[in-house]
């Protein structure tokens, strides 16, 4: 693979001057707008921002991957850990259904999913910011602890409340590991090969699609769902040993360089208030005061300073507002239905009202009060960023409409085996994993993203149309016919996903510099999780509000005992052990599942329209051989060097997007004709 794949080969590489796109950047620096959250009117460079110590350290760490073998080993270590992580996620995802079924709370599957995604969404920006303060490796180890504790609690939970508590900790751990790997891969790759690097996170699906179903069946046959969850508390940490070894090696090697020492000295000198306190305590030592007491005060001073500093830098209050806002709005929507409706209860109305009231509070905090907002407002105003974020919400919103209840629909409603019911939804990830490397190599040649994204969204229209038919017209007899149709739809969904899922993130990263890359990745992933929460919420709301009544209606229509509707609604997996495929009560359940699924898939199909609309506003930057466009468009008159600290622009807006320009010209022509 090309040397330009990694930062080590990037130092000496640049695009030829004959490339007209890069030349355009150099000639049009006024159009390359850059803003900062701490502007200074007295400085000519107020539109520029200084790189943080964490970003500079990450650049030094990546430089230690100075050979093909080290690069290959580093990427392979991430692949191995991600492989086990993916298997774990798929297996534990299936066991959520068995856990809720054992608690007689199967309809709360979507609620558990919402809790998981809301917590993940709030934790991702914090991970990105904290990794810049304390380091990627340190934060990964913390995420590992959260993950292990969460798995242990989930496996030993004896009711839904304890299980949900373990899921919160587990979600914090899993989301942290994934986002840190993505940031590591982005640190170590150029824009041109960014998609290929990030594709490593999807490659395990090629194997896991076929393996996870067998693993689930084997665990359920020999053990229980509880053991199937606890198993990963020691399996996953073992798989991370190669990655941790590579990270420790890079850290040790970097610490021996003068550049690293200089950055550490500058960082230490920047903590003025802390240094003043420590100097005072050192004088107390010289005066002969008890060492234990003085060292204790020094330790607490450091801990207090960095705790407060971290809370401000990660916008801790903003993260809490996200959790409260989304949790209070989304969770009640899935809990209000069921056997008895709860819409008139205060326990449903009050959280919804408070949740909606928190939305303007969150906006005011982020725009006016936050010292370090989750993402700078001036960066968010760029269409390349807000369009990508809108697509992130809609993408997971759409995909979760047919997928939220995929396993029970296949297992109960289409007579699939445990293996097939587990494997079929994973075909999406399998085909996507096969598609991504091909698109990655094609993108390295074309170096433009927008055309690929448009094509992928068009494919999704076809896939969602297939779901409307095959998941919405089941007759309770031809199980295999409808299972095969769902499998084809999943394959098309994965094929389209490969064209725009990761590519939209790459497009957003190309709009900013290395300083804000981690924040953009984290916010994109957080909004991605929020979209999944919306999808789970809507699908869960439709399911819980309509499923019980629909099952009961079909039971009455077919002459079955309508009282069975309550049993199948609460514990469908237990119900089908008694009522086999083809029996009248089972046919009633299958018809009810199909009716509700049709509604879900129609919602997903309709949401593909705004998905296509927002894709029009994405930027279409030329992907260079540099880590970010700041390295390609350096203008010495606007570049400030202070020691080893580089100052660079935040937003790059000159992307020469022919699609958007055509739309703009058409809009201006229509407006002119009206006048």
Image (cartoon, rainbow, N blue to C red):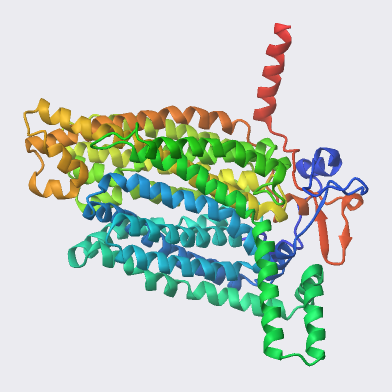
Q: Nearer the viewer, residue 312 or 220?
A: 312
Kindly identify the residue that appears in the image at 82 percent across and 85 percent down: 283
Residue 621 showing in the rendered view: no
The image quadrant that residue 148 belongs to is bottom left
Kindly identify the residue that appears in the image at 18 percent across and 49 percent down: 573
Q: Is residue 142 above or below residue 490?
A: below
Residue 126: x, y in percent? 59, 57
Residue 314: x, y in percent? 64, 56
Q: Nearer the viewer, residue 408 or 371?
A: 371
Q: Is residue 528 left or right of residue 557?
A: right
Q: Residue furthest bottom?
A: 288
Q: Is residue 251 left or right of residue 173?
A: right
Residue 455 showing in the rendered view: yes
Exactly how many numbered labels are in the figure?
Answer: 0
Residue 550: x, y in percent? 21, 30
Q: Quadrant of the N terminus?
A: bottom right
Q: Is residue 632 above or below residue 151?
A: above
The image quadrant that residue 24 belongs to is top right
Q: Is residue 374 above or below residue 163?
A: above
Q: Nearer the viewer, residue 671 or 207?
A: 671
Q: Quadrant of the C terminus?
A: top right
Residue 277: x, y in percent? 78, 75
């Amino acid at each position: 693979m090309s040397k330009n794949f990694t930062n080590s080969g990037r130092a000496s590489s640049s695009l030829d001057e004959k490339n007209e796109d890069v030349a355009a950047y150099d000639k049009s620096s006024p159009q390359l707008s850059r803003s900062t959250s701490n502007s200074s009117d007295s400085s000519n460079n107020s539109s520029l921002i200084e790189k943080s110590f964490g970003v500079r350290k990450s650049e030094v760490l990546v430089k230690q991957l100075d050979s093909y073998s080290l690069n290959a080993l580093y990427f392979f270590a991430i692949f191995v850990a991600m492989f086990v992580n993916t298997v774990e996620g798929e297996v534990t995802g299936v066991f959520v259904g068995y856990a809720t079924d054992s608690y007689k709370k199967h309809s709360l599957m979507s609620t558990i999913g919402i809790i998981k995604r809301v917590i993940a969404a709030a934790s991702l920006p914090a991970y990105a910011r904290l990794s810049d303060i304390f380091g990627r490796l340190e934060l990964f180890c913390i995420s590992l602890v959260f993950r292990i504790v969460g798995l242990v609690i989930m496996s030993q939970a004896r009711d839904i409340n304890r299980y949900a508590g373990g899921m919160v900790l587990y979600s914090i751990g899993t989301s942290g590991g994934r986002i840190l790997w993505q940031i590591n891969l982005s640190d170590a790759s150029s824009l041109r090969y960014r998609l290929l690097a990030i594709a490593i996170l999807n490659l395990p699906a090629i194997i896991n699609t076929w393996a996870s179903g067998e693993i689930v069946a084997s665990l359920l046959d020999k053990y229980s769902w509880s053991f199937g969850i606890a198993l990963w508390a020691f399996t996953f940490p073992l798989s991370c040993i190669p990655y941790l070894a590579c990270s420790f090696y890079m850290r040790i090697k970097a610490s021996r360089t003068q550049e690293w020492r200089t950055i550490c000295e500058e960082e230490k000198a920047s903590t003025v208030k802390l240094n003043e306190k420590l100097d005072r305590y050192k004088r107390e030592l010289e005066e002969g005061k008890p060492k234990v007491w003085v060292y204790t005060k020094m330790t607490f001073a450091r801990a207090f300073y960095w705790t407060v500093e971290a809370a401000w830098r990660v916008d801790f209050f903003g993260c809490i507002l996200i959790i409260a806002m989304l949790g209070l709005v989304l969770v009640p929507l899935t809990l209000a239905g069921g056997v008895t409706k709860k819409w008139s209860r205060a326990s449903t109305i009050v959280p919804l009202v408070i949740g909606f009231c928190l939305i303007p509070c969150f906006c005011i905090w982020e725009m006016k009060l936050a010292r370090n907002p989750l993402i700078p407002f001036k960066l968010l105003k760029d269409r390349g960023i807000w369009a990508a974020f809108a697509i992130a919400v809609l993408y997971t919103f759409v995909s979760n409409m047919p997928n939220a209840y995929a396993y029970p629909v296949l297992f109960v409603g289409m007579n699939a085996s445990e293996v097939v019911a587990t494997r079929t939804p994973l075909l999406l990830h399998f085909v996507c994993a096969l598609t991504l490397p091909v698109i990655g190599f094609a993108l390295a040649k074309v170096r433009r993203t927008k055309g690929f994204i448009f094509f992928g969204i068009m494919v999704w229209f076809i896939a969602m149309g297939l779901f409307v038919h095959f998941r919405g017209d089941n007759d309770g007899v031809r199980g295999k016919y409808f299972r095969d149709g769902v499998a084809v739809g999943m394959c098309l969904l994965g094929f389209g996903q490969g064209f725009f899922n990761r590519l939209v993130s790459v497009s957003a990263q190309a709009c900013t510099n290395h300083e804000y890359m981690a924040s953009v990745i984290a916010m994109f992933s957080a909004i991605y999780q929020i979209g999944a929460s919306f999808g789970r919420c809507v699908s869960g709301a439709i399911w819980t509000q309509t499923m019980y009544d629909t099952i009961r209606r079909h039971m009455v229509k077919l002459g079955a005992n309508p009282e069975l509707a309550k049993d199948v609604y609460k514990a469908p997996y237990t119900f089908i052990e008694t009522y086999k495929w083809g029996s009248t009560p089972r046919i009633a359940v299958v018809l009810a599942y199909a009716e509700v699924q049709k509604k879900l898939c129609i919602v997903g199909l309709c949401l593909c329209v705004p998905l296509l609309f927002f894709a029009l506003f994405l930027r279409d930057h030329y992907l260079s051989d540099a880590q970010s466009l700041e390295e390609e468009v350096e203008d010495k008159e606007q570049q400030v060097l202070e020691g080893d600290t580089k100052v660079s622009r935040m937003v790059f807006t000159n992307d020469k997007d022919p699609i958007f320009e055509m739309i703009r010209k058409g809009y201006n022509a229509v407006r002119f004709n009206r006048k």
